Each structure stands twice: as C-alpha cells, then as structure tokens.
Image (cartoon, helix red, strand yellow):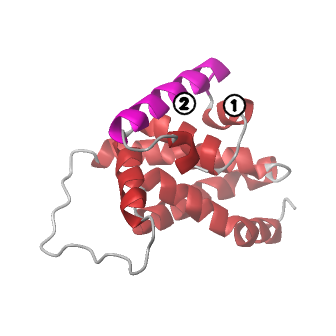
Amino acid sequence: MATPEGFAEFVVARQAALLRTAYLLTGHAQDAEDLVQTTLVKVVPQWRRISDNPEPYVRRVMVNENVSRWRRRRWREESTDVMPERLADAGDHDELLAVRAALSALAPRQRAVLVLRYYEGLSEAEIASALGMAPGTVKSQARDGLARLRRALPDVEDVGSLTR
C-alpha cells in the first residue's frame, strides 16, 4: 500500500469522510474542499512512511492546516450583497444553522476535539494522538467546548446529542 496506487485507493475510499471532517472544521464547503486538497498534498511526500496507518496522520495534518488557515484568515470579513438561499424542506434547519454557528464560534482546537470526538467517534486517546496533545488537554478542550455550545444553544437540552 506504500505505492502511488495505494495513496489513490486511500483517497477514493476516505474522500467522503475527509470532506465531512473538513466541512465540520471549516463550516464552508469550498473551504473544506481546499482543506482536503491541501492536506493530501502535504501527505503525499510522507506516504511511504505512513501508508500502514495513514488516518491519524492525515487527521492531524488536516487539523493543523485548518488552524493555520484560520489564523491567516480570521481578520477577514465576509460580506455579501445576496443572502444565501435556505434549504427547502429541511426539518431541523434552524437548529442545524444554530449548531453550525455555535461550532464556528469555538476556538479551532475545541472545534477539532468536538468534531473528532462526536462526529468521527474517536476516543480521547486517538484524538490526543491525532492532535499531538495530552489526553487531559483533550478532556479539558471537550469540556470547555461543550460548555460554550451549551451557552450558545440554551434551548437545546442535550448539546451532545446534536453532535451524534
């Protein structure tokens, strides 16, 4: 699997999951696609070394790249003359938008921990390994992130259920 074909197989097999994670980290479809592409470009030179178990390395590169992008772009405002269209027949659309806004307001590390924990289903140890932090830091980031989500979404009884 340490071959270029192995890399292509990995990308094809994991593309949807990588895009989902990137979207949850960035909050925008176009940024998610850019993040996945940038991540894969950075992973290619390391493929022979990581091909046995590439997932943790790819996630770490993705999270680190997202934090770097956030730091470079956080001062920019996004203004528009046209409001985005609303989805038709979306039952929990307002709740979805509220959760998305609350997630985007979190610090990048808190968002990364919550996305990897509740959307990707990783354990605290796997998150710690993927993000290069201590398990205790993962726990505190998750605790603080969930507390901020609860404050941002006071009408939602179980914030943890929104992420499942």
Dominant SS in magenta: helix
Q: Is residue 112 above or below residue 137?
A: below
Asked which secondary structure carries label 1, the reply is: helix
Residue 12 located left or right of residue 84? right
Q: Is residue 139 above or below residue 72?
A: above
**Viewer-proximal residue, 111 or 144?**
144
Q: Is residue 14 above or below residue 98?
A: below
Q: Residue furthest bottom?
A: 88
Magenta span contains residue 141: yes
Q: Who's the residue at 18% across and 54% down the image?
A: 77
Residue 159 located left or right of residue 15? left
Residue 84 located left or right of residue 66? left
- Kind of residue at badge 1: Glu
Q: Position of residue 17 (x, y in %)?
A: 65, 62
Q: How busy is the neighbourhood of tag 1: few (under 14 within 10 Å), some, or many (20 plus)?
A: some
- Kind of residue at badge 2: Ala
Residue carrying label 1: 124
**Badge 2 vs badge 1, beta-carbon distance below 8 Å:** yes
Q: Quadrant of residue 93?
A: bottom left
Q: Who's the residue at 31% across and 45% down the image?
A: 72
Q: Who's the residue at 57% across and 64% down the image?
A: 19
Asked which secondary structure carries label 2, the reply is: helix
Q: How busy is the neighbourhood of tag 2: few (under 14 within 10 Å), some, or many (20 plus)?
A: many
- Magenta segment range? 133-153
Marker disc for residue 142? 2
